Image (cartoon, rainbow, N blue to C red):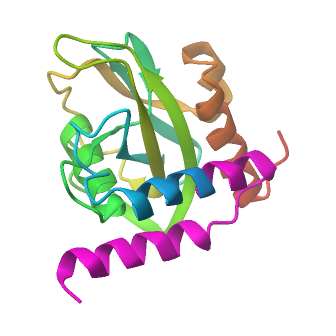
Amino acid sequence: MNESDEARTKLIRQLKSYHGCDTQDGATARQICELVEANPRCAERDCFPAHLTGSAWVVSRCGSKVILLHHRKLDRWLQPGGHADGELDLQQVALREAREESGLSTIVPIDDAIFDLDIHKIPALREHPEHLHFDLRFLCVGDEDESIVVSDESHDVRWVALDELVRYTQERSIVRMHGKWLARRGVHS
């Protein structure tokens, strides 16, 4: 078994062992798993109509804040993340993107488990047709005392207090991750 086959096998195992919060989560995991099993190019950004991406839900050490960035192309507040560019270790993709998009070198995963899954539509831009991102999200922690650096992909990046999150976004998937993080901490929203 070569390195690519091992990475694909690991990813399929991660997806099959994902414990979502409802039946929609399970259906999303199955749909992403089907893409990975059927398409060897699933992690390439030119794989249409859908390809894999990796994102990070980055919380502060105390757990009361999360990193959000105001995405330049999509004009929305989102979690850091991006294209896999052929990499099937989506946790590494999430870490790379979170570090690049925030400037925080201290971001580390809390564990190896998939934290959240999402399938969302990306509008047509330049030469790329409208397509789907099959996004695997991982739970990470970062040091809020480290200086943030805004990349050219964003208008702004900041630590947002969880109790102020809805002032920045009401994106369904971010609200869902917020709820999952509160549940994990044992906090009732």
Q: Nearer the viewer, residue 35 or 189?
A: 35
Q: Residue at x 56, y 48 (%)?
A: 117
Image-based side of 186 in relation to 2, left or right: right
Q: Where is residue 131? Give x, y as percent.
A: 39, 26
> Can residue 58 be seen in this snapshot?
no
Q: Residue at x 28, y 51 (%)?
A: 43
Q: Residue at x 38, y 14 (%)?
A: 123
Q: Nearer the viewer, residue 114 or 61?
A: 114
Magenta stretch: give its range.
1-29
Task: State which quadrant residue 81 falls in.
Answer: top left
- From the image, which quarter does the C terminus lie in? top right
Q: Where is residue 142? Give x, y as percent.
A: 37, 53
Image-based side of 123 in relation to 115, left or right: left
Question: Does 46 sit above or below residue 3?
Answer: above
Q: Is 2 included in the stretch rendered in magenta?
A: yes
Question: Does 65 sit above or below residue 2?
Answer: above
Image-based side of 92 in relation to 78, left or right: left
Q: Main secondary structure of the magenta part?
A: helix
Question: Does 37 sit above or below residue 78?
Answer: below
